[in-house]
Protein backbone atom coordinates (compact mmCIF):
# COMPACT_ATOMS: atom_id res chain seq x y z
CA UNK A 1 0.00 0.00 0.00
CA UNK A 2 1.51 3.32 -1.07
CA UNK A 3 1.28 5.97 1.65
CA UNK A 4 0.31 9.44 0.52
CA UNK A 5 3.18 11.78 1.37
CA UNK A 6 1.36 15.02 2.08
CA UNK A 7 2.54 17.06 5.02
CA UNK A 8 0.38 16.88 8.19
CA UNK A 9 -0.22 20.64 8.08
CA UNK A 10 -1.72 20.31 4.62
CA UNK A 11 -4.35 17.95 5.99
CA UNK A 12 -5.00 19.32 9.48
CA UNK A 13 -5.07 22.89 10.81
CA UNK A 14 -2.11 24.20 12.78
CA UNK A 15 -2.06 22.98 16.36
CA UNK A 16 0.10 24.18 19.19
CA UNK A 17 2.89 21.89 20.36
CA UNK A 18 3.99 22.12 23.97
CA UNK A 19 7.75 22.16 24.03
CA UNK A 20 8.20 23.08 27.68
CA UNK A 21 7.59 19.70 29.28
CA UNK A 22 10.50 17.53 30.26
CA UNK A 23 9.92 14.08 31.69
CA UNK A 24 11.13 13.14 35.12
CA UNK A 25 13.23 10.04 35.72
CA UNK A 26 10.21 8.22 37.19
CA UNK A 27 8.04 8.25 34.05
CA UNK A 28 8.30 4.76 32.57
CA UNK A 29 5.22 5.33 30.38
CA UNK A 30 7.10 7.93 28.37
CA UNK A 31 9.99 5.54 27.83
CA UNK A 32 7.61 2.78 26.69
CA UNK A 33 5.77 5.17 24.37
CA UNK A 34 9.08 6.35 22.92
CA UNK A 35 10.24 2.79 22.26
CA UNK A 36 6.87 2.01 20.65
CA UNK A 37 7.15 5.03 18.34
CA UNK A 38 10.70 4.03 17.37
CA UNK A 39 9.55 0.45 16.67
CA UNK A 40 6.59 1.58 14.54
CA UNK A 41 8.85 3.96 12.63
CA UNK A 42 11.37 1.19 11.95
CA UNK A 43 8.60 -1.20 10.87
CA UNK A 44 7.39 1.46 8.42
CA UNK A 45 10.96 1.78 7.08
CA UNK A 46 10.98 5.53 7.80
CA UNK A 47 13.81 7.67 9.11
CA UNK A 48 13.36 10.10 11.96
CA UNK A 49 13.87 12.89 9.46
CA UNK A 50 11.07 11.62 7.21
CA UNK A 51 8.59 11.13 10.06
CA UNK A 52 9.41 14.59 11.39
CA UNK A 53 8.89 16.08 7.93
CA UNK A 54 5.54 14.33 7.47
CA UNK A 55 4.38 15.33 10.95
CA UNK A 56 5.54 18.92 10.57
CA UNK A 57 7.87 18.83 13.56
CA UNK A 58 11.62 19.11 14.00
CA UNK A 59 13.81 16.01 14.09
CA UNK A 60 15.31 16.80 17.50
CA UNK A 61 11.84 16.81 19.05
CA UNK A 62 11.14 13.36 17.61
CA UNK A 63 14.49 12.14 18.94
CA UNK A 64 13.54 13.38 22.42
CA UNK A 65 10.15 11.67 22.23
CA UNK A 66 11.66 8.35 21.13
CA UNK A 67 14.20 8.61 23.94
CA UNK A 68 11.38 9.09 26.47
CA UNK A 69 12.70 12.55 27.38
CA UNK A 70 9.64 14.61 26.49
CA UNK A 71 6.12 14.75 27.86
CA UNK A 72 4.23 15.30 24.62
CA UNK A 73 0.67 16.49 24.12
CA UNK A 74 -2.07 14.43 22.53
CA UNK A 75 -2.04 16.79 19.54
CA UNK A 76 1.66 16.16 19.01
CA UNK A 77 1.15 12.42 19.39
CA UNK A 78 -1.65 12.62 16.82
CA UNK A 79 0.77 14.20 14.33
CA UNK A 80 3.22 11.35 14.84
CA UNK A 81 0.46 8.75 14.60
CA UNK A 82 -0.70 10.27 11.33
CA UNK A 83 2.85 10.42 9.93
CA UNK A 84 3.41 6.76 10.80
CA UNK A 85 0.05 5.72 9.36
CA UNK A 86 -0.90 3.78 12.47
CA UNK A 87 -3.89 3.57 14.80
CA UNK A 88 -4.10 4.93 18.32
CA UNK A 89 -4.25 1.36 19.60
CA UNK A 90 -0.85 0.68 18.00
CA UNK A 91 0.69 3.53 20.00
CA UNK A 92 -0.56 2.39 23.38
CA UNK A 93 -0.44 -1.38 22.90
CA UNK A 94 2.79 -1.73 24.88
CA UNK A 95 1.60 0.30 27.88
CA UNK A 96 0.44 -1.67 30.90
CA UNK A 97 -2.18 -0.60 33.40
Image (cartoon, helix red, strand yellow):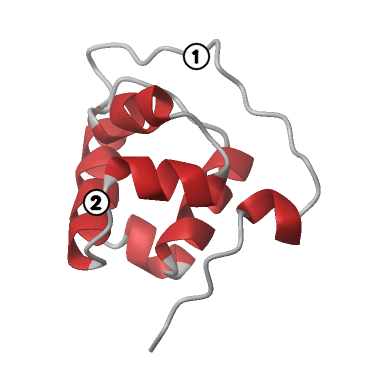
User: Residue at 78% of width from left, 41% of height from top?
Assistant: 14
SS at badge 2: helix
User: Residue at 35% of width from left, 57% of height from top?
Assistant: 92
Count residues near mark 1 (Cα–Cα under 10 Å), then give few for <14, some for 14-19, many for 20+. few
Left/right placement of residue 12 relative to residue 35 reads right
Q: Is residue 77 visible?
A: yes
Which residue, given by chain and number where applicable, does mark 1 sit on?
21
The quarter of the picture where the N terminus appears is bottom left
Figure check: 43 above or below 15: below
Location of residue 20 (image quadrant): top right
Left/right placement of residue 32 relative to residue 73 reads left
The spot of residue 77 in percent (x, y) is 51, 45
User: Residue at 56% of width from left, 52% of height from top?
Assistant: 78
Q: CA distance from mark 1 to mark 2?
A: 20 Å
- Label of residue 36 in the image: 2
The spot of residue 87 in percent (x, y) is 45, 70
Q: Nearer the viewer, residue 58 or 88?
A: 58
Count residues near mark 2 (Cα–Cα under 10 Å), then give few for <14, some for 14-19, many for 20+. some
Which tag, 1 or 2, sits closer to the chain's start?
1
Whether the residues at callouts 1 and 2 have beta carbons within 8 Å, the answer is no
Left/right placement of residue 67 relative to residue 7 reads left
The spot of residue 41 in percent (x, y) is 27, 56
Figure check: 96 above or below 58: below
Amino acid sequence: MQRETRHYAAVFPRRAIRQDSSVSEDSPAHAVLGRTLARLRAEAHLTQERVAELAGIDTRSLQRVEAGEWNISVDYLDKLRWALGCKWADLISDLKE
